[in-house]
Image: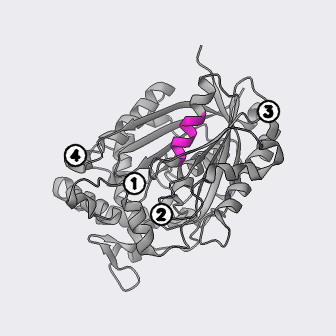
């Protein structure tokens, strides 16, 4: 019999340009998750940290910092997971596997990153390390340039995506205005996002500044619990209905980037494992590191056929009041993208949606949610289906 696993608590710092240290962020998120789950720290059997790091901070041995959250966490096994921008989801999967293997009943998962103390050039160089380094042409690309290629290839195959990209940026900024934890509380009108200007310059043509996610500090945490472990009442827990991980070739030259096959395989496998279809989803938190990524994810999710992702915007499907809102949090674009925290944040906020704790970004009556966290250029792909527990 498959062990049912639940999220039983969450923690989430504010995202932004913060004075806090990496340790302070980790401890804040961990303590909140423990308190929300009503689980004594002594009952935590394992600790997993998602942290990309890549030389951004001196805290290279950061998993041990989580023990600072409470004295009773001392001697609890702790380890760090790194899988580029999907480090948070990788940590969650490690926690799920520990419970499935019978090695743990309650696992504390934290995702954290401290980025804003570094220059834009330093952060860009650090993140570029998630690309293929053994091809000089690919190694020379920054990630804005990688997704600029995606936009160009999409335009050649299906038509100009720039209008849809601008609408995605404006949508996510509008959503973030209602998320008290978001980095950016500044509306960006579609007209501003659509045009290149002094305030919205080209970063990597055709990508404009408004098409790029934010360099951010922050942390998030969740508690994963076996069904028979100490936990809060059923109304305050969320079932992990499916969790799928698909990895693709790292060299872009070995795959059709715009086909987004890795994300599609992961998401469709998660639907199958959960026994649902895209029509059942009440919301999705997805990896909009750059606006072309969100457009391609609409198609990978099955919201529209290939090449028709713009229809999800034109028909209102992905807006806050639409059939399947995408990135109610503001997404990476406006909530922020502290790399190691991103995947855990998606799950923490999904948990809050499904337990009616999401505040201003609440989707009323939500029962099913998707979290999709991606590492690199659609290389490490993690899809989770979350289900409200109505038992």
**Label 3's element?**
loop
- On the image, which quarter does residue 224 sit in? top right
Which circle, 4 or 1, is nearer the viewer?
Answer: 4
Provide the residue designation for mark 2.
333
> What x and y, as percent, mark residue 16?
60, 69
Provide the residue designation for mark 3.
233
Mark sitting on residue 294: 1
- Where does the magenta region start and end? 88-95
Asked whether the residues under the numbered discs 3 and 1 touch, taking CB atoms below 8 Å apart as contact, a structural biologist would say: no
| Separation (CA) of disc 4 from disc 1 | 17 Å
- Point out the tag, 3 or 2, that comes first from the N-terminus: 3
Q: Nearer the viewer, residue 45 or 371?
A: 45
| Separation (CA) of disc 3 from disc 2 | 34 Å
* Residue at far top of view: 1
Which circle, 4 or 2, is nearer the viewer?
Answer: 4
Q: Quadrant of the N terminus?
A: top right
Secondary structure that dominates the magenta span? helix
Provide the residue designation for mark 4.
256
**Label 4's element?**
loop
**Label 1's element?**
helix
């Amino acid at each position: 019999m498959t062990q049912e696993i639940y999220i039983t608590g969450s923690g989430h710092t504010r995202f932004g340009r913060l004075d806090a240290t990496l340790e302070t962020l980790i401890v804040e998120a961990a303590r909140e998750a423990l308190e929300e789950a009503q689980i004594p720290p002594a009952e935590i059997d394992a600790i997993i940290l998602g942290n990309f790091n890549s030389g951004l901070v001196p805290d290279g041995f950061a998993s041990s910092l989580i023990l600072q959250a409470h004295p009773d966490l001392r001697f609890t096994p702790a380890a760090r997971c790194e899988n580029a921008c999907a480090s948070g989801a990788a940590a969650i999967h490690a926690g799920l596997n520990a419970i499935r293997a019978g090695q743990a009943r309650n696992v504390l998962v934290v995702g954290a990153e401290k980025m804003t103390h570094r220059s834009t050039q330093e952060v860009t160089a650090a993140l570029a390390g998630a690309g293929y380094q053994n091809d000089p042409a690919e190694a020379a690309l920054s990630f804005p340039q990688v997704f600029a290629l995606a936009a160009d290839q999409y335009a050649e195959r299906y038509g100009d995506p720039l209008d849809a990209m601008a609408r995605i940026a404006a949508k996510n900024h509008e959503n973030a205005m209602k998320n008290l934890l978001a980095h950016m509380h500044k509306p960006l009108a579609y007209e501003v996002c659509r045009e290149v200007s002094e305030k919205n310059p080209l970063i990597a043509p055709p990508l404009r500044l408004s098409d790029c996610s934010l360099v951010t500090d922050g942390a998030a945490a969740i508690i994963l619990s076996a069904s028979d472990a100490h936990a809060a009442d059923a109304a305050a827990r969320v079932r992990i209905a499916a969790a799928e991980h698909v990895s693709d070739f790292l060299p872009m030259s070995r795959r059709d980037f715009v086909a987004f096959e890795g994300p599609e395989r992961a998401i469709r496998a998660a639907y199958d494992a959960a026994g649902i279809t895209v029509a059942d989803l009440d919301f999705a938190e997805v990896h909009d590191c750059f606006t072309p990524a969100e457009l391609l994810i609409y198609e990978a999710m099955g919201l529209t056929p290939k090449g028709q992702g713009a229809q999800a915007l034109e028909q209102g499907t992905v807006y806050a009041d639409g059939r399947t809102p995408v990135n109610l949090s503001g997404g990476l674009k406006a909530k922020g993208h502290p790399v190691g925290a991103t995947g855990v944040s998606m799950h923490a906020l999904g948990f809050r949606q499904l337990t009616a704790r999401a505040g201003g970004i609440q989707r009323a009556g939500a029962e099913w949610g998707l979290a999709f966290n991606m590492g690199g250029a659609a290389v490490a792909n993690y899809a989770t289906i979350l289900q409200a527990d109505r038992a």
